[in-house]
Amino acid sequence: MLMRSRKLLFATTVALACLGGHAQAHEYKAGALTITHPWLRAVPGSKVGAGYLTITNAGSTPDRLTGGTLTGAARLEVHASSTEGGVSRMRPVEGGLEITPHQTVTLALGGYHLMLMDLNGSFVDGELVPGTLQFENAGPVPVEFEARPVGAPPPASHSHTH
């Protein structure tokens, strides 16, 4: 009986450790900023891609997302999508994306996003891709982007801290 209890305790501990590690990859803190659910599109064979996430500024001063880096990409830039006269356009956000105090900004399909340029290969669905977001005040923030295939919905919201 004692041996079975120890095995069950060990199995439960291992399962929770694995689950905890995966869940923690969804939220990151840097000062007053909280970055949640960084993810990117896994587009096989493409030289460009897009990254998405949500940033909340709980502080009393603004900050600005100015860019970053991503393993497997030559450049990561903040871009905005818009549709004018039925034509979709993407353009860099000059000076970066401001996150004012007590504001939540979501980088999502059809709006603000991270443009991943000169990709060195494809990402695999579910792969966690290391990157760094660069903020004007908070500085560099290491994150992992979850690769998701074209057509997949964004990751579900969780409230775990990394």
Image: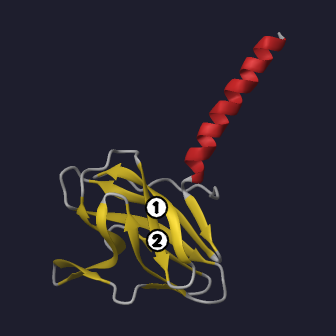
- Residue 77 can be seen in this image: yes
Residue at point 36% right, 64% down?
Answer: 51
121 to 97, vertically: above or below: above
Q: Furthest-right residue in view?
A: 2
Q: Quadrant of the N terminus?
A: top right
Q: Residue at x 70, y 32 (%)?
A: 13
Q: Which residue is mark 1?
A: 38
User: x and y percent of residue 25 in the render?
Assistant: 54, 53
Tell me residue 83's x, y (percent).
Answer: 23, 80
Mark 2 or mark 1, whichever is nearer to me:
2
User: Percent from the top left, x then y, of residue 143?
Assistant: 50, 61
Residue lying furthest top in this view? 1
Q: How many marks?
A: 2
Q: Quadrant of residue 72?
A: bottom left
- The structure residue drawn at horizontal position 61% and vertical position 86%, both measured from the top left corner, is 101
**Residue located beneath label 2 in the image:** 133
Which one is in front, 122 or 23? 122
Amino acid type, callout 1: Pro
Left or right of 153? Residue 45 is left
C-alpha gap between disc 2 and disc 1: 10 Å
Q: Are marks 2 and 1 in contact (CB under 8 Å)?
A: yes
Q: Residues within 10 Å of mark 1 (few under 14, many from 20)?
A: many
Residue 108 vertical placement versus 14 (above, below): below
Give the x, y percent position of residue 116.
Answer: 30, 66
The residue type indicated by label 2 comes to Leu
Badge 2 density bin: few <14, some 14–19, many ≥20, Cα 10 Å:
many
Query: What secondary structure is found at the residue carrying circle 1?
Result: strand
Report if residue 152 is visible in the image: no
Q: Residue at x 66, y 88 (%)?
A: 60
Look at the numbered disc 2 and give the secondary structure of its residue: strand
Badge number at residue 102? none
9 displayed left or right of 101:
right
